[in-house]
Image: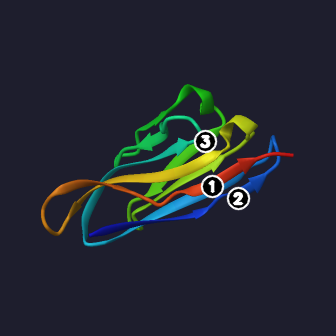
Amino acid sequence: QVQLAESGGGLVQPGGSLSISCAASGSIIIVDDMGWYRQAPGKERESVATITRGGSTNYVDSVKGRFTISRDNAKNTVYLQMNSLEPEDTAAYYCYARALDKSIYWRDYWGQGTQVTVSS
């Protein structure tokens, strides 16, 4: 089994910054794509940013230029630096990872979510 543990999140004022991270652990052989999704109340879950093992990134248009995703392959950890936060960024943020575990199956794993609230 593979577990994803998120940290960070919280309350920040509009225009502020926040960083969240997610570490994968357990029966991991290798982690491929990692990313962050978010879900606001009453809305569908959307992809915010993804990053391949090689470092190629992709962002939803609404966060381009404000958010930066990065990862540390040695630590199986993915980070999301969020700047110029807006109230519309308020949501539960979920970490995602596609990993090959010791059962020799590729599986998609999800974290439990961390709340980010942007409000004055």
The N terminus is located in which quarter? bottom left
**Cα distance, mark 1 to mark 3?**
11 Å
Residue 73, by quadrant, is bottom left
- Whether label 2 touches label 1, CB < 8 Å: yes
Q: Residues within 10 Å of mark 2 (few under 14, many from 20)?
A: some
Q: Amino acid at mark 2?
A: Gly
Q: Please state which of residues 36 and 77 is positioned toward the viewer in this rendering.
A: 36
How dense is the environment of label 1, judged by Cα within 10 Å: few (below 14), some, or many (20 and up)? some
The residue carrying mark 1 is: 115
Residue type of the residue flagged with mark 1: Gln
- Image quadrant assignment for residue 76: bottom left
Indicate which disc, 1 or 3, sits on the residue closer to the N terminus: 3
The residue that disc 3 covers is: 41
The residue beneath circle 2 is 10
Find residue 99 and report its horizontal and vertical position in percent. 27, 57
Residue in the image at 62% along x and 49% along y: 81
Asked if residue 86 shows in the view, the reply is no
Classify 5 as above or below 52. Answer: below
Mark closest to the chain's N terminus, 2 or 1: 2
